[in-house]
Image (cartoon, coloured by chain):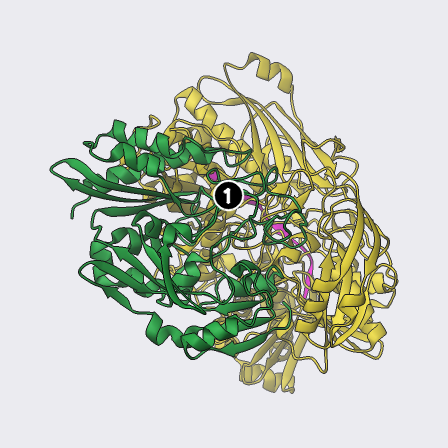
Chain colours: A green, B yellow
Amino acid sequence: MRPFSYQRATDPDMAVQALSADAAVDNPLTRATVQPLAGGTTLIDLMKLDVMRPAAIVDINPLAEGWSAIDPGRENLRLGALAKMSDVAAQGEVQRNYPVIANSLKLAASAQLRNMATLGGNVMQRTRCPYFRDVSYENCNKRNPGSGCAAMDGVNRMHAVLGVSDQCIATYPGDFAQALIALDATVEITGRSGTRSMPFAQLHKAPGSTPETETALRSGELISAFVVPGRWPRSVYLKARDRQSYEFALSSAAVALDVQHGAIKDARVALGGVATVPWRSREAEALLKGQTFDDGLAERAAEAAFADAKGRQYNNFKIALGKRVVARALHRAVTMEI
Amino acid sequence: MNAAAPEPKANMGQPVPRYDAVAKVAGRATYGSDMPLDNPAYAFLVTSAIARGRINGFDLDDAKRVRGVIDIITHENAPDLKESKLFSNGGYAGTTIQPLKSADIAHDGEIVAVVIAESYEAAREAANRVKVSYTAATPSASFDSPGTTKAAAKGQNAQFKEDPQVGDFAKAFDEAEVKVDAAYETPTQHHNPMELFSTSCVWMGDDLVIYEPSQYVYGLKNGVAEQLGIDADKVRVVNPYVGGGFGSRGSMTPRTAIIAGIAKRLNRPIKLVPTRDQGFTIATYRAETRHAIKLGANRDGKLVALRHEGVEVSSRADPYCVGGTKTTTRLYACPNVDSLVSIVRADRNTPGFMRSPPEVPYMFALESAMDELAVKLDMDPIELRRVNDTTNEPIGGKPYTSRSLMGCFDEAAKAFGWSQRSAAPKSMSDGDWLIGYGCAATCYPTQMAPSAARVRLQRDGRTRVEIAGHEIGTGAYTVIAQTAAERLGVPLEQVAVFIGDSDLPPGPVAGGSNSTASTCSAVMMVCDQIRQRMFKAMMPRQSLTDKAKETVGIGRTPTMQAAKSDRTLDLERAFDALGVGVIEEYGEWKPEGAPPDSFKAMHSGHARLVGGAAMKDKIAYAFGAEFVEVRVNRFTHEIRAPRLVGAFAAGRIMNPRTARSQLMGGLIWGMSSALLEATEIDQRTARYVNDNLADYLVPVSADVPGVEVILLSEQDDHINPAGAKGLGELANVGTNAAICNAIYHATGQRIRKLPVRLENIEV
């Protein structure tokens, strides 16, 4: 860890102003020298590891009063970016009408972390790629753009099979983001020119040739809220992992269905643990819509979801695993009692 | 009595709570890096980013500019330290690779620089700013890497004396009616004790005090003295509490003498707290192993041929190996046995002792093969063990001092509900989950080492016991206090125990599960010296020895319990007769079969364990049986082990509460070893990749909802005066095989490589 200055922002304007002090104003947030601090569960770790070396930290926790509301309205669900993961997971209406959200949060991290971590920070959580997190490896296109990727032919069991490029195969590690992308959430971003909204699906950037960018957030910008349209009581989050708790997904699926008179009217499928970014499978959704559910349909949808997957030496199993997880999640969603 | 404090059965002590429980829960227990130091400087390590090659040079400008930096030590300006011999070859060190000696790099994460600063933060920041330029050579990472060398263990590792053999294996195997011929593999594992590999070195003139978690304070004291070239009497090692050891702190690591040398030069105390990932490379680990097992049996299940070949990885510099064939060739009755252990050398740090070093990998192979044999014979695996149970080991024909293996199988099977198992694979399920039951034998050699003790008894009954033993979380304080209280007939609350300090009378290394047997035997002997003195004073005209034996029980083993004729000591009368206020006795105890120079070796920190398979006319092991329910998800292939049941017999159980905790921990670790733990090595660079506790998986509470420990009564009068067999390393031995055997039962799939992960399951 290196010395840094610390400032508490007591209102959004102050936060934005402080975060805009970055020398290069339009830096992607990942590269910004001024970083926002919420729960701190990712940032502090990465600073200790010398992976992130911000010159200044802006503590935005004082904004929680205005930015942590859980607001289940008639038309949509609004979640403040500073709401704690544990609070949202435990909220009754979220559990009833958005089980995929509640479970994606409940199955993430540990109780201690969920009590600290905020929703906004959670979706911004950076990859767990061990080569990214250890600065003694020079080859990491995320840390040192253009230096190569040590994971490509290294220990890559946890790495992505979807959305990969020849520059980076690091997995997006979170769970909650899969629920958001599946449910067509929008994200509210507060910056110098006020508040703007964008589809959550546009927040994360696949690595392509710029794996260091990661998200559409620029320095000086903050996530202030998420808005989830509609209600999705028939939704599940299924997570396969090495141990029963406190572990990242090897493969997960966020599935939401609208089944009417036996037919799938609308279907949402998102994948976790297998992709470089929160991953929505419109291919699987297209196959499901308008159909009557059976196991064969689930398998075809799962097949479609992984049609473009690229496995490597140690993570190739994720393709077969991911398909089974998707099929099982669909089955659970169809058979769940609501 | 609650579950944590099992009701004592015959030949068990009381399940009293831990001596140090309140101190630990209240945060009052002081560990090495908690020790207050006067004006310390802080050290932070820089470790190599390559596994093989040379350092071209350093760019230290940026680092030296950090405010508070005092000095940066590299091989160019390091203190001159003498070499140290490998522990396994009669020395003190866990590795002979001495960092900061030259520009050469021998393994990933070797110490290449030590930053000294006014604060931990400054030292860390400067360490981050040290730039090292290397010329890297292609390293050999493991078994399959080009450039490794392979040779038999015998002849290069002094602790590995023989490849056990008997009869004519080749002929018997050839003619056997039923055969198993299979290969097994275990991964690299790291101990990851909670307490990091810290050290603090404080000089007072020519005297050095080291605060460091150690499982062998006498070894560390003597080893550091040797490296510094000073008299061992000038060095004191203090660690009243150790935050876990698991073998990682039994031998000296290079860091201690380096920090001591720098502290001397700086004339200031230095505190080093390395990071978690540095712990993967500056200390030892369990190396990966490979096994080829051949079993031949008659149709009735009787073994006629057994061959166990093991191959282990070690460093280029050191011939470390665990050589578990000494156990696996002797466990079952079999007239024709062959074995061979070899060592493969790669560009790695030197491996070392890790909980049940030989038995974990070698018994995994044997007990998996036994299950495979049971399947081929269409025989219940418990019955297969019963058919091959024996009172004498087959290699030398020596009798087991006691052996409750089948008693353990029967008790555990009953508690587990083994009779509910339908034998066919894939025949049990519950919703999404396939269910499998599996079992395996577990065993661990009963070992002892010479130990001294000093006991001081006051007129009011207050007692002080001093012994350089180690509290590594096992309950050493507690059982030592219980032993003294029982032997002197004073209340337990009156006994104060002092351990973890090399200024105390020498105790054994806290390794090989010998501590309880050795320290308690020594304490018993010294307590008896006190009783004898008192008795002499009280009954001056009697024939002392004979009368004392018959009257106060001196010389009796506690396994016989305090006989009814034993009289309690009347302390007041005894002290009146003696005319003193305090009695203090010192004594040195050594186990049967210890070499003549044992006491000399004890004082110079050369641990010598005797027992197990190495005894002259007998063989001593503790045994157990472990049963596991696994559940394998049909869809995700996730594997969970919701029920672990173990029954164990280990001679006298000094304290059923602490014993149960040890065995529970062992079962959980065994599960972890089978399903979770593995250090991943980048085969290109020979570097450890998952070197942290987020990526190196160990179980969380949700993984172990059901753990049951059954303690069997067992009495063994042929091992040591305490009558105790070590059990700290007993439980994590059998679990690996039990889990794989259960996975076979659940899925019909035999998995021979650990850890088993969901991608290995094909349902």
Image quadrant assignment for residue B81: bottom right
Q: Which residues are magenta?
A: B440-452
Q: Position of residue B119 (x, y in %)?
A: 69, 76
Chain of the residue where label 1 is placed in the rendered structure: A
Image quadrant assignment for residue B159: top right
Residue depicted at 68% across the width and 54% down the height = B283
Considering depth in this image, is B234 or B270 the residue closer to the camera?
B270
Q: Position of residue A336 (x, y in %)?
A: 20, 44
Most prominent secondary structure in the magenta stretch?
A: strand
Q: Is B73 rendered above or below residue B596? A: below
Which quadrant, please, contains the N terminus of chain B?
bottom left
Q: Is residue B268 visible?
A: yes
Look at the image and say whether residue B30 sits in the magenta stretch.
Answer: no
Residue type at tag 1: Met
Residue furthest left as drawn: A261
Instruction: Bin the neighbour count of mark 1 within 10 Å (Cα to Cα): few under 14, some 14-19, many 20 and up.
Output: many
Residue A335 in the figure: left or right of residue B357? left
Residue depicted at 17% across the width and 40% down the height = A259
Q: Is B738 rendered above or below residue B591? A: above
Residue B687 in the figure: left or right of residue B3? right
Mark 1, residue position: A158
Q: Is A285 rendered above or below residue B724? A: above
Residue B64 in the figure: left or right of residue B398? right
Which quadrant, please, contains the C terminus of chain B?
top left
